[in-house]
Image (spheres, rainbow, N blue to C red):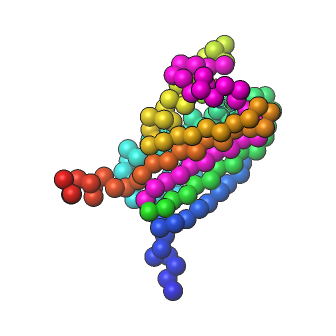
Amino acid sequence: MDKGKQTGVQEKVSVEFESYSHNEQFARVVTAVFMARLNPTMEELEDVKTAVSEAVTNCVIHGYEDRIGTIRMELTCDQGQLTVEITDWGTGIGNIVQAREPLYTSKPSRERSGMGFTFMETFMDSMEVRSAVGEGTTVTMKKKIGNKILEKKVV
Ligand SMILES: Nc1ncnc2c1ncn2[C@@H]1O[C@H](COP(=O)(O)OP(=O)(O)OP(=O)(O)O)[C@@H](O)[C@H]1O
Ligand SMILES: [Mg+2]
């Protein structure tokens, strides 16, 4: 059987990398390669890569602060729906509702703008945050990919 023909139907990959800031670029590239099978538009590709950058940067800057830890990124596609799950085992978030508010940042002195979660929510269809102080944080984001042309044809 030609297993290649099933590509994009239901698949999962996961990668783990260390929280060096240059690995934000690594995560973006891995995401773009994985998304290629979903035939994304340039806009969809850029949206997801931006969301991934924000989530990974948060793990680097907030999750692990001044130390190096492990970041896990899991990418799943199922019938054109992309799920990106990014986990760190760092400081965790005490107040998730507050953290998700636009312009809230716990590091104003480091010139953060507090817009990372807002960008993730804007560029993806949904975003969920699970976190526990001292245990870490998981951000799960979903977006339907590559259905724009089909939608236009129906209308
Ligand atoms: N992985 C994480 N671990 C611990 N805390 C986090 C994590 N991600 C986000 N936070 C907390 O949530 C706050 C809001 O995150 P958000 O990405 O919206 O803004 P920011 O990172 O402070 O600024 P910006 O993303 O605009 O540079 C952070 O300031 C931080 O306190
Ligand atoms: Mg941020």
Rendered image quadrant of residue 97: top right
Residue found at x 52% / y 66%: 10
Quarter of the picture for ligand 1? Answer: top right
- Residue 11 location in percent, x, y? 55, 65
Q: Is residue 62 above or below residue 82?
A: above
Is 93 within the magenta? Answer: yes
Is 79 within the magenta? Answer: no
Rendered image quadrant of residue 94: top right
Residue found at x 66% / y 13%: 109
- Nearest the eye: 2 or 82: 82
- Nearest the eye: 97 or 99: 97
Residue found at x 21% / y 57%: 154
- Residue 59 location in percent, x, y? 68, 36
Q: Which residues are magenta?
A: 80-106
- Residue 145 location in percent, x, y? 41, 53
- Residue 110 location in percent, x, y? 66, 17
Can you see residue 22? Answer: no
